[in-house]
Image: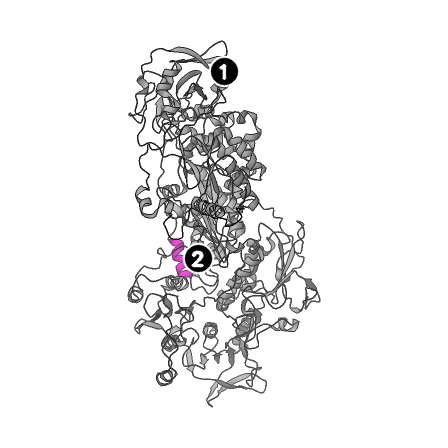
Amino acid sequence: MSGNWQPQIPIQEIKAGPIENGPDGVVGSDKVSNEGERKKIVVVGLGMVGISFIEKLMKLDAKRREWDIIVIGEESHLAYNRVGLTSFFAHRKVENLYLNPKEWYSNCPEGSLNYHLNTKVTEIHLNEKLVSCSSGETVPYDVLVIATGSDALLPRHTPGHDAKGVFVYRTIEDLEKLIEFGAKNKGTVGAVVGGGLLGLEAANAMMDLENYEKVKLIERNRWVLSRQLDSDAGGLVVEQVRELGLDVLLGKRVGKIEVTEDNYVKGVVFEDGERMDCSTICFAIGIKARDELARKAGIKCADRGGGIVVDGELKTSAPDVYAIGECASWENQTFGLIAPGIEMADVLSFNLTQAKDHAYRSFKRPDLSTKLKLLGVEVASFGDFFADRDGPKHLPLRAAKKKEGSPDALRKLTNGTPPPPVKALTYKDPFQNVYKKYLFSLDGKYLLGGMMIGDTKDYVKLVPMVKNQKMLDVPPSQFILGASKEGDEGGDDLDDDTQICSCHNVTKGDVCSVVKDGSCKSIGDVKSCTKAGTGCGGCMPLVTSIFNSQMKAMGNEVKNHICPHFNYSRADLYNIISVKQLKTLQEVMKEAGNDPESQGCEACKPSIGSIFSSLYNKHVMAKPLMGLQETNDRFLGNIQRNGTYSVVPRVSAGEITPEKLIVIGNVAKKYNLYTKITGGQRIDMFGAKKQDLLAIWKELVEGGMESGHAYAKSLRTVKSCVGTTWCRYGIGDSVGMAVRLEERYKSIRSPHKMKGGVSGCVRECAEAQNKDFGLIATEKGFNLFVGGNGGASPKHSELLAKDVPPDDIIPIIDRYLMFYIRTADKLQRTARWLEALPGGIKYLREVILEDKLGICASLEAQMEELVGTFFDEWAEAINNPEIAKKFQQFDNTKDSLETMDTEEDRGQTRPVYWANESAKVDFRNTKWTSLTWQPMIEASHFVGADDTPNGISANVKRGDTQLAIFKVRGKYLASQQMCPHKRAFVLSDGLIGDSKDKLWVSCPFHKRNFELNGEQAGRCQNDEEVSIATFPVEERDDGMVYLKLPPVHELDGVLGTKKWSVKKGESGASPFEKLDRKIGVNGTRMKGRKPLEAKRQLHAGAVKAGGGDGVDIDW
């Protein structure tokens, strides 16, 4: 995730006050927060790892504010960049090395950070949970984090090690002493003992002082940098640094230090007897973990090599005590590089803040890759760079050969140990001083590691290849032949998650984000915001190049009018309605429509209704809104082929109790509903009659359930695997996260339906990567994917943010969904929306993560408001008499009619298949023998029609015929109820459209539009093969609405329900007829397969024959 991302929901922050006479002139805070009792974390050590832990903890704890931090630093300085110590010789200003300016400490939220400098912790009291300081003070803790780092090694067994002129290279104080001593000993020889990274840095520093006539580097091995480079690479570095004026002595060990009578250094004697004059010796021979504080307290420390023993979660042997950085010993290893310490800080800060909603992260085998510029020489090593010498530490599974038994012992003695399963590709250019060695698996399909001298441009590209262990799609030779290209330093071909600064784990995306959002307008700003380049500085050329290559222009504006009634797109209408707070169709038409008096149509009405719901979240069946809804929203259920509805209660994340399962089972059995598990992990009940819906919902609501909004253009489900709840592979609580997401976003209307998914690990059992939003748990949080969907045009989702802590998931998804709701076209899924979005996922990241448009706070606030207005639509319908009276088949009688035959299939009842042909009778031109006015329904049914967007309609029964009556814009209209396309009796539930004086009804099934008035009344506008009969209609003074109709027997003969209801067999032979001949009906001849009915028959037969007692579960 972008490093500068912060939630926008306001968190109250009270600025801290200053400490009077604070150490080092720094203003800090000694106040305790007044927002309630918080736990205290005491951090011992204010070095690079300590401050990194503090920064990460404060960021992850920004919402919860569970922790107050007290940090105790032994040095007199604020946290500074120890990796960049050499630069101190040039500027001599410690402030230039500070990782954070002084103001940062005083500007932290009140009580969140208290610090002490120049103070040494002398003892840990584990039982009392206190630490004692050299000042005499004691500090209590709830959690103690030891980040004391390490000390530079000094060979105390070597005579003269305590002479004046002997130094180590570790702290600001060490450098200040070296500078002072060098100034008094100009023209002498300075020596550095140790040819590792630190030794070369120290030698460079002494040369930069320009006090010494000669600087000599003493190394006991045959080449320098022996821990990072092989002999060829190390030898090449020796050649280059010698050319730069450094005298390198190889294979030399210091036997003793010669001193004067005043105990000043005058020379060294090597173990081979050779002698050398010098006045100054700087030892850079390694470090020793500072574990003395822990040892004194009885905390377990490593016997060999030292260090405080920690497990994968950085816990020590003492409760609530952790160790991170160079003082920690993990699997008998301590690490002298900054990157593993930063990773430890990352893991521990996450576990203390986010793990309760996730899984605990573990510190794992760190990446020891390094890239530095030493004495002007570019040096890099990455991955398993000694795999050819020591054997690979880890091989990808596909590259590891299967063992075929133990090798013969005699053969092993004769032939020796077999070579490592590694092949090396080496390139050496003595003219340009370039050396490269890349190590591959035996098949050349995996890059394992390597080293580079002179040309290290490909470092940032190769490190992710090793980390990800992805199979290579190019031959190994291309890594050498294509390595050096002019102008190939821009990083344009790097992924956003490519690490470009290993010291502070900064990715290309982190740098890009702070440049694009305008917060960083110089390289200095980038370094301050991201910390890139503030460690070793080796990444600065690439950081500079990425900085310079940004700021590309956005794409073109696209206009898409929603329908002929508006010259605006859905997004335009959304903004108009939102800004002007319009709440009825009439208001929208007057403000934005082409005809202020228009009733709209089947295209714009649902979109406007959806916008109203997204803004105000009122019940969709309320009178001002019901006329805007599609049929599914009109009756809070998906209409099915036979005019019945499906019922889908909410089952958040697929998690349901046995009690609720029994409620669903009882309801389904009572109302003879066909049941099926959906793809979204819930239970769908089909075949509910409109007049039964209220009773069904009432039983479900009383059983603790609510609407699942399967009928709405809103959130359907958030699918989940079981994650850490049960699965042994899970690393994240996918069920817990999915429940929270589904409960948050349920009922919120959007341009199209939305689905989510949460997987507890990379095995991806919840299929989160084909959802509108999906999460996959990682050790650091969740990877967040967006813009995927199945359907007719499936699309894989795209990665929006990586390793998002659980606390930050909700604000990001809030922003994403609200931005989609505001800007998408009508009926546009997130996949198509993201494809059409100028700039695509890149632009979406800028808007959602970097707040490019400055709207993130508004997006979050709007979502928060919507979430706060939730109500269960089923429960409201049950309790609202005005809404409840709409749930009946006919509006003029309590009678009911079946509109389609049913059949038994696999033990359940379902409607028969649709007929192969439409009803192509010319109903429009039917010649009736006679027509008379017949009272059909009370006019009071249509009260308020003129104030309703779609008017008011009614389904009435006369004889066996169903008729639809509409009152729109003060006019009555009437037609047959059956849509002839699929012979479905549904037209009264259709949306009304208009164009000038012409009115039409749109069938809710497949949008056949039938004209209701004028000379073309009855004509289908978009299917000339079908038509409908229309009838004169009027309201009379007796309070009734009359239709002019033929005699009942004649009407039934043309339009009767029994005549046109779809019968079994009209669809032809079963689609499985041929297959069933082969495998039996429903697979009964498949091995081991017995359908339910077959099992019941077998059981009944066994009971009849005297086997068993016939007892079974009685629902």
- Image x and y of residue 147, in percent: 58, 66
Q: Quadrant of residue 105?
A: bottom right
Amino acid at dot 2: Thr
In the rendered structure, are the residues bearing label 2 and label 1 in contact, judged by CB atoms less than 8 Å apart? no
> Is 8 left, or right, of 27 in this rendering?
left
Crowd band around label 1 with a 10 angstrom C-alpha radius: few (<14), some (14–19), many (20+): some
Asked if the stretch drawn in magenta spans residue 228, the answer is no
Residue 417's place in the image compared with 398, above or below, is below
Q: Is residue 362 in view from this perspective?
A: yes
Q: Look at label 1 and name its amino acid.
A: Glu
Q: Which residues fall within the magenta stretch? A: 534-548
Residue labelled with disc 1? 938
**Residue 875 image point, x, y percent:** 56, 33
- Name the secondary structure under disc 2: strand
Q: Position of residue 813 (x, y in %)?
A: 48, 45
* Disc 2 target residue: 507
Q: Is residue 81 above or below residue 677?
A: below
Q: Is residue 869 visible?
A: no
Q: Position of residue 821 (x, y in %)?
A: 45, 38
Q: Nearer the viewer, residue 1053 or 769?
A: 1053
Q: Secondary structure at mark 1?
A: strand
> Taking 1038 as reference, is 405 above or below it?
below
Q: Most prominent secondary structure in the magenta stretch?
A: helix
Q: Give the answer, above or below, for where 1039 lies relative to 117.
A: above
Pointer 2: residues within 10 angstroms few (<14), some, or many (20+)? many
